[in-house]
């Protein structure tokens, strides 16, 4: 598939960061973007709302529908998916991007934060996938993409933040299981993860400033996601893709334009050897 023109994408956590970047990249093809996130009003510390991103989608050449959504709320998910499908005539692609992070040890992780990470990362991914299934089953080239890492069972990825790792790996296990479960229906289920840290609010709030400077822009994840969506859903499923590797397969050799600091060192992301 050479373009996503006319395809409908349901993206969670799309008010900023990687979700926003994916929305804008696909909008340039003329795609229909369902912009969902909790942020309907401006945040004092974080940029972007579902409405500002919807306006950017339209300016980029796509069509937009902004829906405020808490992915922990089963009823709200069902209503949002039904609204999106009715508005655009179906759903072709689901992007489970919404995620919560707290990089603290066991003693320092309150139950409230534990529940938030599992509610957003695991429950949200599972329930959004579940709700979109009837519409994906009718699509010509349906994809579910989870922004989740490859399953790497080394102690180093658990010991400092076991709750966060379990929550992200819960998303990864959705990829592993659902890819096999829906293979017969031709619904691709994949994960995408960055080789380096990505310059997002999550990095800015959880890491030193030097890490942000050694990161890449969200555009690299958006370009990689766009490439995955154009692949045949019946053959490209069950993969734990890495952004740079996907783009190298597409013929990209120069990655300097993605760097926050061109020519500078790059910070490897979590969960990758």
Image (cartoon, rainbow, N blue to C red):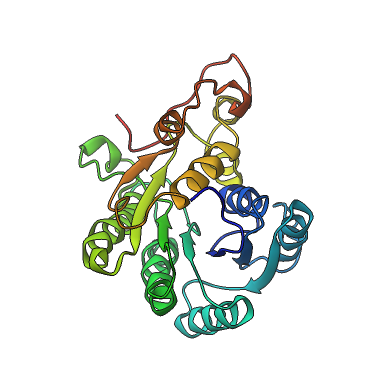
Q: Residue furthest front?
A: 2
- Whether residue 102 is visible here, answered yes or no, is no
Question: Taking 185 as reference, is 52 left or right?
Answer: right
For residue 194, above or below residue 56:
above
**In the image, what residue occupies the spot 33% across and 38% down?**
271
Question: Taking 19 as reference, is 117 left or right?
Answer: left
Residue 226 in the image: state x and y as whole percent: 52, 47
**In the image, what residue occupies the spot 54% across and 24% down?**
255
**In the image, what residue occupies the spot 47% across and 64% down?**
94
Residue 194 in the image: state x and y as whole percent: 44, 37
Q: Quadrant of residue 113?
A: bottom left
In which quadrant is the C terminus drawn? top left
Question: Taking 178 as reference, is 199 left or right?
Answer: right
Q: Residue furthest top?
A: 263
Pick the front one: 216 or 224: 224
Q: Quadrant of residue 213?
A: top right
Residue 92 in the image: state x and y as whole percent: 48, 66
**In the image, what residue occupies the spot 41% across and 68% down?**
119
């Amino acid at each position: 598939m050479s373009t996503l023109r006319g395809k409908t994408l349901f993206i969670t956590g799309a008010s900023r960061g990687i979700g926003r970047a994916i929305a804008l990249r696909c909008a340039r093809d003329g795609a229909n973007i369902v912009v969902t996130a909790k942020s309907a009003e401006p945040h004092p510390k974080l940029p972007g709302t579902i409405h500002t991103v919807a306006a950017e989608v339209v300016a980029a050449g796509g069509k937009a529908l902004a829906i405020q959504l808490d992915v922990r709320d089963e009823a709200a998910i069902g209503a949002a998916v039904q609204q999106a499908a009715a508005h655009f005539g179906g759903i072709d692609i689901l992007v489970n991007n919404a995620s919560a992070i707290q990089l603290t040890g066991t003693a320092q992780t309150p139950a409230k934060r534990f529940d938030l990470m599992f509610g957003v990362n695991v429950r949200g991914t599972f329930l959004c996938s579940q709700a979109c299934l009837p519409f994906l089953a009718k699509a010509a080239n349906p994809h579910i993409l989870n922004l989740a890492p490859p399953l790497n069972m080394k102690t180093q990825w658990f010991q400092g933040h076991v709750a966060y790792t379990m929550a992200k790996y819960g998303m990864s296990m959705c990829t592993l299981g659902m890819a096999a479960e829906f293979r017969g229906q031709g619904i691709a289920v994949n994960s995408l993860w960055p080789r380096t840290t990505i310059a997002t609010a999550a990095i800015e709030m959880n890491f030193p400033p030097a890490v942000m400077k050694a990161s890449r822009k969200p555009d690299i994840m958006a370009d990689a996601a766009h490439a995955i969506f154009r692949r045949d859903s019946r053959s490209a499923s069950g993969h734990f893709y890495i952004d740079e590797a996907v783009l190298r397969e597409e013929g990209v050799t120069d990655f300097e334009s993605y760097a926050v600091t061109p020519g500078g060192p790059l910070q490897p992301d979590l969960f990758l050897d």
